[in-house]
Image (cartoon, rainbow, N blue to C red):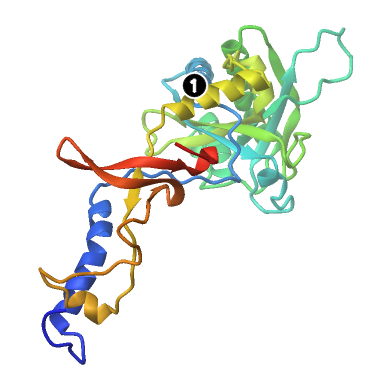
Amino acid sequence: MTGAALDNLKQEKIQQLLAAVAAESAQDAGQNIETHDYDWRQPRYFSQGQLNQVKSFAESVATAASTGFTQFYQGDFEVTSDSISEHLASEFLLQNPDQQNGDYYLAFGPVPAQPAGAKSAEPWGLIAMPPETAAAWITQSLGDSASQENSIETLSELEESLLFDIASIFVQAISAACDNQEFKAIGGITTGRLPLEVEGTEELCKITFATKKPDDQQPFRAFLLTRCDRLEVAAGIVKEVVETLGPADAANAIAQHLNHMHVRITAVLGSTSVTLEDLLNLAPGDIIVLDKRINDPLELTVEGLNFLRGRSAKSEGKYAVVITHNTALKGNR
């Protein structure tokens, strides 16, 4: 090498080396690659297209509920679909049933085809009302003179009856949004334990609604909770048709796809090792001796694997390699 060897690396060359190492990562960071968090614990029963259908269903429920609330309160009332989310039932089953100021529930199910007096159907879903929502709805029913602050510790018989009537508006709205299903309330207002028989691993859909009178400073929310598969049927969610292939067709499709993939081939002349100090002191005109002879075959790697062998050549003014051996085919060419 040219120049005398240094006992210590110069600070300037160390900085150059660090800058070179960081150059690629800095370039990648500037590309603003969009990423999305993925939580494997979050169920994904509905595809994006189906979620759009659920959103349309929720908007229909909100429209029907707006009409029902307006009639009940004899004044303008707005109900909107606030959010749609999917959950495992365990999220709700693990809640403490003895918690104070817990949500109020009204279970509902399909109107039975049996004669009156027959056994009630299993709850299809429920309407859940946080304490502050229940207090607001009851206050708006009784008037400002009977104002409640933020929650209700114990419902009186009158308050429970009012809350039942208001929650039933959502049950009627859900029936109106379903083409082939009619629902009715099952039992009365409950709190504590979830009045829905589900297993911890079942997938539930939660649709949150925001209710608001024109003079309300903020909306009060309630939500519909039901199993995803029940909602899929009742709301007429169209299943996406997925074409399935037999094993032979699937293998052929994969092979056809792989055949058109581009791979990078790297010709390796040889390699050697030097100290970091020698590397930083390399200058134009220096010669690096590799570990292969001139007549040794070149190795061509694909994704870091030795795949081909050949000898150096030139073609149309460019470096080229004549293939002499294909390792993948176990033979010579």
Q: Answer with the quarter of the image where residue 129 lies.
A: top right
Q: Is mark 1 on a helix, strand or loop?
A: helix
Task: Rate crowding at label 1 as few (under 14), some (14 to 19) or many (20 or more) other CA atoms within 10 Å.
Answer: few
Q: Is residue 227 left or right of residue 214?
A: right
Q: Viewer-proximal residue, 275 or 250?
A: 275
Q: Is residue 133 left or right of residue 324?
A: right
Quadrant location of the C terminus?
A: top left
**Amino acid identity at mark 1:** Gly
User: In x, y percent, where is residue 306?
Assistant: 46, 50
Q: Residue at x 71, y 50 (%)?
A: 94
Q: Which residue is drawn at 71% across and 53% down?
A: 96
Q: Answer with the quarter of the image where residue 233 lies.
A: top right
Question: Residue at the front extreme?
Answer: 295
Q: Name the residue under label 1.
A: 49
Q: In this view, does 130 lie to the left or right of 279?
A: right
Q: Residue at x 55, y 41 (%)?
A: 330
Question: Residue at the right extreme?
Answer: 118
Q: Quick check: can you spot residue 149?
A: yes
Q: Viewer-proximal residue, 222 or 155?
A: 222
Above or below, 98 against 324 in this view is below
User: In x, y percent, where is residue 294?
Assistant: 30, 58
User: In x, y percent, where is residue 324?
Assistant: 41, 42
Above or below, 159 against 72 in this view is below
Q: Quick check: can you spot residue 81?
A: no
Q: Viewer-proximal residue, 317 or 264?
A: 317
